[in-house]
Image (tube, rainbow, N blue to C red):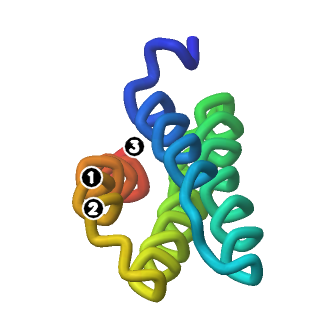
C-alpha cells in the first residue's frame, strides 16, 4: 500500500537526500531524526481508521518537515530546499484535507 502513497515515496526520497548531506554533527542528527519522522508519521497516519486521526499524524509529519527546512536554511542548502517544495505542498494538503 505504501508503494502507491505518493507523498510517502517523496518523503523517502527526501530522507535519503538528507542522509547524504554534509552538515555539522549537531545538526546532522536532528536533520536525520526530523526527516525520518516525516516518513514514519505518514506510514502510521495512513493506517489510522478515521480522518481526524490521519490528519493528526500528517500534521506531525508537516511539523517535522518544517524542522528540516529550518536546518536546511541554517546550513544554506538552497538546492534541497527548492527540491523539497513539492513534498511540503503534499504534506500541507494531507494535513488539512485528508
- For label 2, count other residues whose C-alpha is less than 10 Å away and answer few (under 14), some (14-19) or many (20+): few
- For label 3, count other residues whose C-alpha is less than 10 Å away and answer few (under 14), some (14-19) or many (20+): some
> 18 and 40: which one is in front?
18
Do the residues bearing badges 1 and 2 touch, measured as CB atoms within 8 Å?
Answer: yes
Q: Is residue 45 above or below residue 3?
A: below
Q: Residue furthest bottom?
A: 74
- In whole angstroms, how far apart are the C-alphas of marks 3 and 1? 23 Å
Numbered tag placed on residue 26 in the rendering: none
Numbered tag placed on residue 98 in the rendering: 3
Q: On the picture, is 75 further left or further right than 87?
A: right
Residue displayed at 25% across by 48% down? 86
Residue depth check, mark 3 versus mark 2: number of the one nearer the observer? 2
> 53 and 88: which one is in front?
88
Q: Earlier in the sequence, mark 3 or mark 2?
A: 2
Q: Position of residue 84 (x, y in %)?
A: 32, 54
Q: Residue furthest front?
A: 22
Numbered tag placed on residue 83 in the rendering: 1
Amino acid at each position: 500500500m505504501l508503494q502507491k502513497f505518493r507523498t510517502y515515496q517523496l518523503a523517502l526520497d527526501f530522507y535519503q537526500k538528507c542522509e547524504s548531506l554534509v552538515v555539522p554533527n549537531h545538526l546532522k542528527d536532528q536533520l536525520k531524526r526530523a526527516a525520518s519522522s516525516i516518513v514514519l508519521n505518514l506510514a502510521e497516519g495512513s493506517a489510522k481508521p478515521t480522518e481526524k486521526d490521519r490528519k493528526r499524524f500528517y500534521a506531525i509529519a508537516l511539523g517535522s518537515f518544517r524542522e528540516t527546512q529550518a536546518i536546511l536554511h541554517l546550513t544554506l542548502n538552497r538546492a534541497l530546499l527548492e527540491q523539497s517544495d513539492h513534498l511540503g505542498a503534499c504534506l500541507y494538503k494531507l494535513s488539512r484535507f485528508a
